[in-house]
Image (cartoon, grey):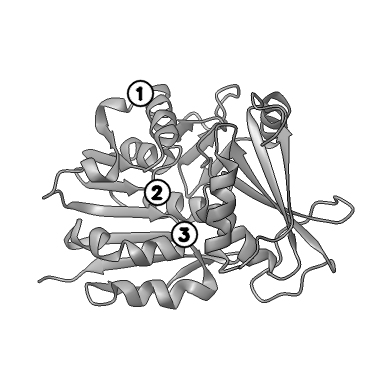
Amino acid sequence: MSDDATAPWLQLTLEAIDHSPEQLEDALLQAGALAVTLEDAGDQPVLEPGPGETPLWSQTRVTGLFDAHTDIEVTKKQLQRFLHAPILPECRLTTLEERDWVRAWMDNFHPMRFGQRLWICPTCQTPPDPTGIHIRLDPGLAFGTGTHPTTALCLEWLEGRELANRTVLDYGCGSGILAIAAAKLGARRVWAVDIDPQALLASDANAAENEVEDHIELSHPTELPGALTVDILVANILAGVLVRLAPELARRVKPGGHLVLSGILAQHADAVQMAFAHDFAFGPLQQREDWVLLDGVRRSP
């Protein structure tokens, strides 16, 4: 562990030598990383290379950001298992001060529009469109502020649908941004679930900030009512997790209802779609950068 156990954030950096940067990124996210960045041996940041592209450097560092209370030794064992590696790649643990990280976020976080009327706006800034629908949101422990392509795809999908009197389930809610958007857009009732207690705390605080806490039911997935089915289920989580959860997600959608899946790299879209193909008819996928959104309609029994 780090010498400074009280630091708000831990950074675990792996060298991409025997594994691709994409493999390390996926493993870090599965192990609970809140964010992942790439850099070269000279610490120069770079945007992620697309799937199948050659890395820009002969050696790439992949860094995962973790909460300070993370048991890094357990995380290392998880990484070794996810990578199917007899020995964990060379790694380095450092700390990151919270105030510097938050300031960097806020310096680059500005109001963003999704679709025609939905805006995500930091609490310290004035919404630019007084006639729009505004979600007040700041970066925090649970990620999800609309800046990632998968979150943007989900927000635009929700904004483009008539949600009045609809029921919505946000599976893997993170910051609660999709659940809050659904409530703001008129959904009658929204359920939001996550396995991370910090995510539920963040979602609760963000729902209160946006005055929709009375419309959103927050819980661990195992606490959902057994017979609950909804008109729309949105799951913005990793492809491998979506495949594993396919039976549970499918049974939660009413006949004729929509299943909206994102968090999926384009190269994994077919595998995810196949996992749900028995119960859902999918339309054309939507893609932004290397990420896709799948929209399926539940077949009648």
Give coordinates of residue 177: x percent, y percent: 43, 39
Amino acid identity at mark 3 = Leu
On screen, 301 above or below 142?
A: below
Give coordinates of residue 185: x percent, y percent: 34, 40
Front position among marks 1 and 3: 3
Callout 1 crowding tier (Cα within 10 Å): few <14, some 14–19, many ≥20: some
State the SS at label 1: loop
Counting residues from the N terminus, which is met first, the one under dot 1 or under dot 3? 1
Hey, which quadrant is residue 208 in on the image?
Answer: top left
Give coordinates of residue 297: x percent, y percent: 25, 67
State the SS at label 3: loop
Label at residue 129: none
- The residue that mark 3 highlights is 238
Residue 290 as seen in the image, left or right of residue 15: left
Counting residues from the N terminus, which is met first, the one under dot 3 or under dot 2? 2
On screen, 183 above or below 87?
A: above
Q: Which residue is drawn at 44% across and 71% down?
A: 285
On screen, 99 above or below 169?
A: above
Counting residues from the N terminus, which is met first, the one under dot 2 or under dot 1? 2
- The residue that mark 1 highlights is 211
Where the N terminus falls, by quadrant? top right
Is residue 116 at all visible to an observer of this figure? yes
Amino acid identity at mark 2 = Glu
Please say if the residues under marks 1 and 3 sit with CB atoms less than 8 Å apart. no
- The residue that mark 2 highlights is 159
Amino acid identity at mark 1 = Glu
